[in-house]
Image: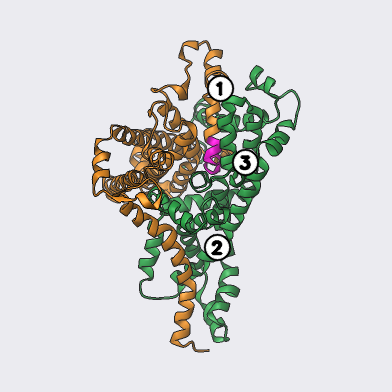
Amino acid sequence: MVQTKKQKYLFLAFCLVPTFLLFAVFTLYPLFSGLYFSFFSWSGSAADREFVGISNYIRLFNDSIIPRTILHDYFLVVTKVIGIMALAMYFAVAIMQMKIKEAPFYRIIFFFPNIMSVVVIGILWMFIYNPSLGLINSGLEAVGLENLTRPWLGSETWALPAIVLPSIWAGIGLFMLMLMGGIGTISKSYYEAAELDGASEWQQFWKVTVPLLWPQIKVSVLYIVITTLNGSFIIVQIMTGGGPNNSTHVMGSYLYQQAFEQYNFGYGATIGVMILVLSLLTVFLLQRLLRREKVQY
Amino acid sequence: MEQEPKGNLLTRIIIRLPLIIWSIAVLYPITWMILGAFKTNAEIYANPWGLPESFNFQNFFDAWNNYNIDLGVFNSLFVTVLGTLLALVLAVPTSYALERLNFRGSTVLFNLYISAMMIPMVLGWIPLFFLLMSIGMLDNLFGLSIVYAVSQLPFSIFVLTTFMGSIPKELEESASIDGMSPYGILWKIITPLSMSGIITVTIMNAIQFWNEYFMALIFLQSRENYTLGLAVDFISREAVYTNAWGTLFASLTIAIIPIIILYAIFQRRISKGMTEGAIKG
């Protein structure tokens, strides 16, 4: 059967058009419309939407909470990248190089938190940090370090660092698997040659493993950065709601508060534009920074 | 070269130690959360981190009957099933067209879908809120399912095109010569042959929708529409005043059990699906 051109186009339209329409309506339109909203002052009802030019942006630059939210976001980015990469790298190398027999056990256990709901992770860790019943404070008391106990999530100093730990806890497994996949493709002959040259295991790690694993390292770092900038506010919202006294607000949780709790939808959209710009800029810069000559031995 | 493992017994133990500690750090809180669901409140206060004295299902009954967890489970099940089906219906034909039908702009369209995986959607949620309101889909589980399905389109298309790319072209060609219509080829040849990819996408999307919290928080308002995540979060916020910790643990356990079951069955597929999704994203 020879298809006519019309039938061919009809089939193509059948495949593409409904999906694209929904994608356009529920993904593309909201993004562009968000950019547009950022030039309005709007409390939600159609009547009082008012064009205000760039005054939301002026407000953004004068809002003393904004620099703190940005700082908190990048604090999470940096601590998560370091914490996750260091631990995931150690675990991956240990499991692969030592040919540990119970490796599947670790793979299965470490990965599981990656598919747990952020709600469950957040609430579980809220209880771990609970001032009177929580695991951390009870543990400190048990070993005689009562003076170190504190209301972790209720402290302006400790609340943000306290949010890092569950994020690392929940993230390790995925990146460990990604790095293990990379290590698996490195030919053993490199290590044998390095050993013959008298390189210590530490030198082998930096001179053989890291360069040859660079593509996986780069992807992992980028992925942690993107998911943190685009999604860290979820665990913040659950665990602290931005408090105490804005000490854990990140850009996304501040957007939620401004738009959906205080009904400053125009200003919320402006914060959203800032998130978009910072996130794209960071990824772009990071991609240049992590570029490295392809290694060949 | 010799194949014997490196290092002596002591170094092997020292290297293993962090692995063992991390295993405990992962398993202990989860186990303890599930055990906590069987404790009475008095037990939780007296002995928060130990074993329960007896296995008491009262907390589960309370959560189910008095704290709206029953509604949460049904609502989450509804959006998960509908969202997953919708994502498949939307993603399978598009993936086939992008992968196999040469048309002008196919690369551009593919890149458009894929790049959406990197864009922070939080900016779009404000207009989406008003869009849903204007079409009467705000505070509506059907509306939320559509939003969920569309949000997972980029990931679904990415995974499905990869799978479809590995199907031999000859099968389509010979079916076409035998007089099968392109709709028939898509439905009777491509769909069954990419079943492995479809299963992966379905499981990943289902986990995503079952666990989702923030879009539900924004787009749902009345308590009878709360998905499980919102219902559990509600109990958690109230627990500060009610001290219903046992009920909270029971509801967290109810939320996590389907995930544990899925993981027990599809562990390899899930970790592979997520790793590959991350590598492209």
> Which chain did the image draw in green?
B
Q: What element carries label 3?
A: helix
Q: Label 1, on which residue?
A: A134
The image's mark for residue B255 is: 3
Task: Mark 1: give few (<14), some (14-19) or many (20+) Cα within 10 Å.
Answer: some
> Which chain did the image draw in orange?
A
Task: Mark 3: give few (<14), some (14-19) or many (20+) Cα within 10 Å.
Answer: many
Residue for point 65% across, 40% down: B68
Residue for point 50% across, 64% down: B91
Amino acid type of disc 1? Gly
Amino acid type of disc 2? Leu
Q: Label 2, on which residue?
A: B88
Position of A67 relative to B266 (above/below): above
Label 3 – label 2 distance at C-alpha = 24 Å
The image's mark for residue A272 is: none
Choose between B54 and B5: the one closer to the eye.
B54
Position of B67 relative to A223 (above/below): above
Q: What element carries label 1?
A: loop
Give the residues in magenta.
A112-121
Residue for point 63% across, 51% down: B77
Choose between A225 and B135: the one closer to the eye.
B135
Q: In this view, does A249 lie to the left or right of B206?
A: left
Label 2 – label 1 distance at C-alpha = 43 Å
